Amino acid sequence: MLKVQDHSEAAADQPFAYRPRQFARKGNISESKVWKMLASGELPSFKVGRARLIPASAIDNLIAGAGK
């Protein structure tokens, strides 16, 4: 039997990763800008099958970097 750790409800509602289109909406930037950032290595990503995914933590890093 798989044992699941108890997390807060807020964390459970948040995905661990976003597709580029979802990330663009969440970050209020264009999807083409997201793809450019992925191509330059500015945004981390990984693939699951054919899907390109961006870790949810990249949103926080993007916001933190914007204040610099």
Image (cartoon, rainbow, N blue to C red):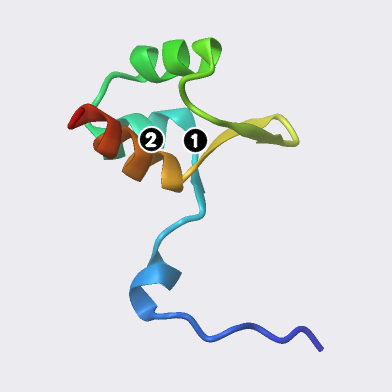
Q: Which residue is mark 2?
A: 23
- Which residue shows up at 51% across the image and 10% down it? 40
The answer to whether mark 1 and mark 2 are in CB contact below 8 A is yes
Which numbered tag is attached to residue 30? none
- Which residue shows up at 58% across the image and 31% down it? 45
Q: Residues within 10 Å of mark 2 (few under 14, many from 20)?
A: many
Q: Which residue is mark 1?
A: 19
Residue found farthest to the left: 67
On the picture, is 12 further left or further right than 52? Answer: left
Three-letter residue code for mark 2: Phe
Say which quarter of the image contains residue 44: top right
Three-letter residue code for mark 1: Arg
- Which residue shows up at 40% across the image and 20% down it? 34
Q: Residues within 10 Å of mark 1 (few under 14, many from 20)?
A: some
On the picture, is 49 further left or further right than 42? Answer: right
Say which quarter of the image contains residue 65: top left
Relative image position of residue 59 (x, y in whole percent): 35, 40
Relative image position of residue 21 (x, y in whole percent): 40, 29
Relative image position of residue 61 (x, y in whole percent): 36, 39
Give the quarter of the figure containing the C terminus: top left
